Image (tube, rainbow, N blue to C red):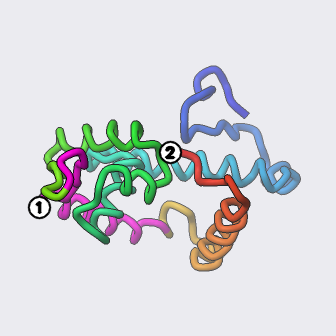
Amino acid sequence: MSTPATAGVPGRVDVTGIGADDLADWPTGRLLSSAARLVEGAWTARLAEQGLTHAGLMALHELAQTQPLPVLELAARCQVTPQTMTRTLDRLEQHGLVMRRRAAADRRRLDVTLTASGERAYRDAADMSAAEPALLGDVVDLALLRRNLVAIVEHLTSAPGRTLPG
């Protein structure tokens, strides 16, 4: 349910006047969608405090695992278009978190690496996972929730031609 003040604002779901009994009657898809927007809004605020976005954190995560990475491969790993990855890397580069260089073997290819500041930013953001219980509440079995979410994503992306949005 959105009001004019919250309509179209990511992470904002107006539940004013909705009791627990009403929420229990919602279809699972509506609950999942509302929960996702609320969690995304909370994480967006926390990441913004560190000058990051979800897209930026995904790129930092992939680079922390393997670097250098060509821009096209990084985009594929993050399940976004090369154009989206370029915009994300522009922001990260402006903040001194990544560096793009022409590959020696193929001058047409741009390779991306983390800077020392990028490594620190990633570690700090990764440490935010300790805040998940406070963010999600004590009533959540976080390990079970994560297993179920992984199963949903794997199921929905296993069909031919289905990928993560982004």
What segment is highlighted magenta in the picture?
Answer: 106-132
Image quadrant occupied by the N terminus: top right
Q: Nearer the viewer, mark 2 or mark 1?
A: 1
Q: Is residue 41 left or right of residue 32?
A: left
**Residue 149 x, y percent position in the rendering:** 64, 67
User: What residue lies at 29% left-to-right and 55% top-to-bottom?
Assistant: 70
Q: Which residue is mark 1?
A: 116
Q: Residue at x 50, y 53 (%)?
A: 79
Which secondary structure is most common in the magenta stretch? helix
Q: Is residue 152 left or right of residue 131?
A: right
Of 142 and 63, nearer the camera is 63
Image location (x, y in percent) of residue 96: 14, 47
Residue on which the image places disc 2: 41
**Dot 2 amino acid type:** Gly
Q: Amino acid at mark 1?
A: Ala
Instruction: Calculate the distance from the C-alpha at mark 2 to the C-alpha at mark 1.
Output: 28 Å
Label 2, residues with CA under 10 Å away: few <14, some 14-19, many ≥20: some
The answer to whether residue 129 is magenta is yes
Name the one closer to the observer, 54 or 74: 74
Q: Are marks 2 and 1 in contact (CB under 8 Å)?
A: no
Query: Looking at the image, which residue sits at the far top?
Result: 4
Q: Considering only vertical position in the picture, is 116 above or below 95?
A: below
- Identify the secondary structure beneath mark 2: helix
Q: Judging from the image, what secondary structure is the residue with disc 1 in?
A: helix
For marks 2 and 1, the one nearer the N-term is: 2
- Mark on residue 31? none
Residue depicted at 81% across the width and 56% down the height:
28
Residue 58 magenta-highlighted: no
Question: Which residue appears at 63% of the width and 76% of the height?
Answer: 147
Front residue of 40 and 104: 104
The image position of residue 118, as x and y in percent, is 19, 57
Q: Residues within 10 Å of mark 1 (few under 14, many from 20)?
A: few
